[in-house]
C-alpha cells in the first residue's frame, strides 16, 4: 500500500471518527459548531504534530465596506461576505521550539465545490484571513468567498512580535522550512479534511492565488507539490529570492553617503524617463508601455551635473546609484537551478505615489532618508527587508555588519537557503501533466522586486518544456508602469475567472483587459488597456485614450 493510499485512508478515518453534521444551509449553526475535532497528523502529507481547531463560528453575511484610506487602494475595500463557518486552528510543530502554524478556513453555507488558498506577503507572520479581494482583482467583483469558494489562509508558521525583526523566525530550522514551502502544503491538507467534514465530500477543484511572497508560494506549490492545486495565479512573485535579498543589500549600499537620492530628485528622474519613453507607444499619458525599449531610450548620463550639484541634476554618486539599480547583480556562488545573476530594475514607475505609503523608488528603494545601520522606518522597504534577510537567513547573525558582509564567507548557508527559498525550478512537467494551469502577472514599474526575474523564470520554463507545451498550461502577462502593489496604471482584471475557465472548461485566457478604477463605489473604470501576453505590450492605435479597444498588443 503506497503513501498516498495510507494518507487517504487516515483522512477518511479521521472524518468517520467524528460525529459532525454536514454544513447545510438548514443546519449551518450546528454543522459549524461540530467542526472542532482535531485533525490527525496522519491526515497531513508532511510530518507535523497534528492540527487543533481552536474555534468554529458561524459568521453572518456582511455588506461591502470602504475605508477612507489604506496602504493601497485595494486595501481600503472590505468586500461583502456571505454566511459562512469561520474555522481557526493551529498545526503543531515537531520541534517544541518552533512556532505553530496558524490557519483560517472559511466554509460558505452555499458552496460551489471549489477552494481557494490565499498566499501571504513580506515575511508573513500575520494570519491571512481569506476574506479580502484577491491580488489584481477588479474592485466591483464579488470576493471568492462570496462566489461560493471555501477560502484558506495561514501565517506560514510564525507570528510577528512587536519590537522583533520580522526575519528573526528564520533562526529556527523548522520555522524556515514552513515559511519556504511546508506550511502551505500542511494547511492545504487540513483544509481538505475540513471540507470533507463540513460538506461530506472533498473539493472538485483547488486553486491558489498570491502576490509578491504569496506569488512565490503559488509557484512553489506547482514546483514542489504539483498534484495539490488545479490552478494557480501568481502576481509579482519573488521567485529568485536569494538574488533579491542580495540585490536589496547592494542597491541599498549604493545609496549610503553621497549616493542617496532625495524625494525631489526621484521626481527629476521620473520626469526624465517619461520624457524619453512615455510617447513611444503613440500616446503621452504618463505611462511607459514599453519598459524594455525604454532601457535603450533613457540615457542616465544626461542627468549628471556638469558642475555644482543643483536640484535639476544628479551628482556622480547618485548617477552611480541609479546605474547600480538598473544593472544585474552577479553572484559569485551557484544558487539553486544554476542561477548566478539577479536582473536589474527599471526604468519606469520611479516617482509613483511618492506622497503616499506605497509605490516607486521612495517606498521601495530610497526612502526619505539614506540607509541607516540598523535600518529605520524612513529607509526604503528593500533595505529593511534585504538587510534583515542577510543577517537572519544567510549570516545567521542578527548583528552581522552589512557593510562588510561578503557572500563568499557564507557559501554553504547561501546554498542551503537558496535550495529552500528560491522558486526557480523550470521543470513544471508534473504540474502540466496533471492538468494544472498557471497564470503569472508581472508589474513593470515594480521596485520591490525585479519583474525581469519572473520573466526570466518563465522563459526558462519555455526552454525546458518548449514554447508550445508551456503555452498549454502557463501564461505570463505584464502590466506596464504598474507598481508592486498595483498603483500607477491599469492593473486589475478577472484573473480568477479566467483561471477557472481554463482549468474547468479548457478555455485559455483571451481578451482580458487591465483596468484602473476608483476605489470608491461604484468603482468606476478610469482607463483600460488590453492584457498583453509577454513579450507584447499595448501600442496606441487611435481613439479614446481611456479605452482598451484603442490599443493593440504589439512587439
Image: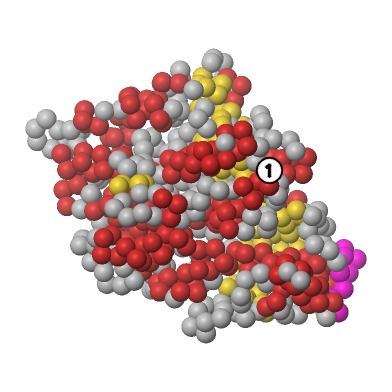
Q: Quadrant of the N terminus?
A: bottom right
Left or right of 310: which side holds 485?
A: right
Residue closest to the eye, 159 or 450: 450
- Per the rendered image, the range of residues in magenta is 19-28
**Residue 58 point in image, percent of width and height:** 77, 69
Say if 194 sits above or below 149 in the image. Answer: below
Percent from the top left, x then y, of residue 48?
61, 77
Q: Is residue 24 magenta?
A: yes
Position of 373 relative to 352 (above/below) = below
For the point 56% across and 16% down, the residue is 543
SS label for mark 1: helix
The residue tagged 1 is: 499
Q: Residues within 10 Å of mark 1 (few under 14, many from 20)?
A: many
**Residue 334, percent from left and from top:** 36, 54
Residue 528 visible here = no
Q: Residue at x 71, y 40 (%)?
A: 502
- Residue 308 as seen in the image, left or right of residue 506: left
Amino acid at each position: 500500500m503506497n503513501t498516498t493510499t495510507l494518507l487517504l485512508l487516515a483522512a477518511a478515518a479521521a472524518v468517520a471518527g467524528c460525529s459532525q453534521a454536514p454544513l447545510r444551509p438548514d443546519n449551518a449553526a450546528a454543522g459549524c459548531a461540530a467542526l472542532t475535532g482535531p485533525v490527525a497528523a496522519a491526515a497531513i502529507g508532511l510530518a507535523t504534530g497534528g492540527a487543533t481547531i481552536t474555534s468554529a463560528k458561524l459568521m453572518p453575511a456582511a455588506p461591502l465596506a470602504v475605508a477612507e484610506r489604506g496602504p493601497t487602494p485595494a486595501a481600503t475595500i472590505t468586500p461583502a461576505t456571505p454566511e459562512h463557518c469561520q474555522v481557526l486552528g493551529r498545526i503543531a510543530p515537531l520541534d517544541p521550539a518552533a512556532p505553530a502554524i496558524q490557519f483560517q478556513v472559511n466554509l460558505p453555507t452555499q458552496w460551489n465545490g471549489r477552494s481557494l488558498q490565499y498566499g501571504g506577503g513580506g515575511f508573513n507572520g500575520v494570519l491571512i484571513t481569506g476574506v479580502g479581494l484577491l491580488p489584481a482583482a477588479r474592485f466591483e467583483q464579488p470576493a471568492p468567498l462570496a462566489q461560493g469558494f471555501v477560502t484558506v489562509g495561514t501565517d506560514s508558521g510564525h507570528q510577528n512580535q512587536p519590537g522583533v525583526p520580522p526575519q528573526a523566525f528564520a533562526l529556527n530550522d523548522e520555522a524556515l522550512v514552513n515559511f519556504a514551502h511546508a506550511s502551505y502544503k500542511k494547511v492545504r491538507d487540513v483544509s481538505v479534511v475540513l471540507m470533507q467534514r463540513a460538506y461530506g465530500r472533498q473539493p472538485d477543484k483547488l486553486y491558489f492565488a498570491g502576490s509578491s511572497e504569496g506569488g512565490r508560494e503559488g509557484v512553489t506549490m506547482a514546483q514542489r507539490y504539483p498534484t495539490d492545486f488545479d490552478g494557480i495565479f501568481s502576481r509579482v512573485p519573488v521567485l529568485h529570492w536569494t538574488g533579491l535579498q542580495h540585490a536589496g543589500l547592494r542597491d541599498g549600499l549604493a545609496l549610503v553617503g553621497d549616493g542617496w537620492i532625495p524625494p525631489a530628485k526621484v521626481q527629476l528622474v521620473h520626469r526624465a524617463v517619461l520624457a524619453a519613453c512615455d510617447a513611444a507607444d503613440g500616446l503621452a499619458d504618463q505611462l511607459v508601455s514599453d519598459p524594455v525599449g525604454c532601457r535603450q531610450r533613457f540615457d542616465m548620463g544626461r542627468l549628471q551635473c556638469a558642475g555644482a550639484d543643483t536640484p535639476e541634476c544628479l551628482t556622480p554618486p547618485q548617477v552611480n546609484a541609479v546605474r547600480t539599480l538598473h544593472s544585474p547583480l552577479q553572484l559569485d556562488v551557484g544558487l539553486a537551478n544554476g542561477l548566478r545573476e539577479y536582473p536589474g530594475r527599471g526604468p519606469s514607475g520611479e516617482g509613483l505615489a511618492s506622497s503616499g505609503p506605497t509605490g516607486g523608488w521612495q517606498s521601495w528603494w530610497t526612502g526619505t532618508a539614506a540607509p541607516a545601520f540598523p535600518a529605520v522606518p524612513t529607509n526604503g522597504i528593500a533595505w529593511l527587508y534585504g538587510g534583515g534577510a542577510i543577517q537572519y537567513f544567510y549570516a545567521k547573525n542578527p548583528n552581522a555588519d552589512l557593510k562588510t558582509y561578503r557572500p563568499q564567507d557564507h557559501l554553504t548557508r547561501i546554498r542551503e537557503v537558496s535550495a529552500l527559498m528560491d522558486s526557480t525550478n523550470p521543470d513544471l512537467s508534473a504540474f502540466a501533466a496533471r492538468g494544472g494551469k498557471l497564470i503569472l502577472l508581472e508589474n513593470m514599474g515594480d521596485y520591490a522586486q525585479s519583474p525581469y526575474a519572473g520573466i526570466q523564470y518563465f522563459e526558462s520554463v519555455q526552454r525546458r518544456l518548449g514554447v508550445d507545451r508551456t503555452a498549454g498550461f502557463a501564461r505570463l502577462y505584464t502590466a506596464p508602469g504598474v507598481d508592486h502593489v498595483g498603483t500607477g496604471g491599469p492593473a486589475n482584471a478577472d484573473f480568477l475567472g479566467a483561471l477557472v475557465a481554463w482549468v474547468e472548461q479548457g478555455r485559455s485566457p483571451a481578451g482580458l483587459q487591465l483596468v484602473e478604477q476608483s476605489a470608491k463605489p461604484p468603482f468606476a473604470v478610469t482607463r483600460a488597456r488590453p492584457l498583453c501576453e509577454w513579450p507584447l505590450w499595448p501600442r496606441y492605435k487611435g481613439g479614446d485614450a481611456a479605452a482598451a479597444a484603442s490599443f493593440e498588443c504589439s512587439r
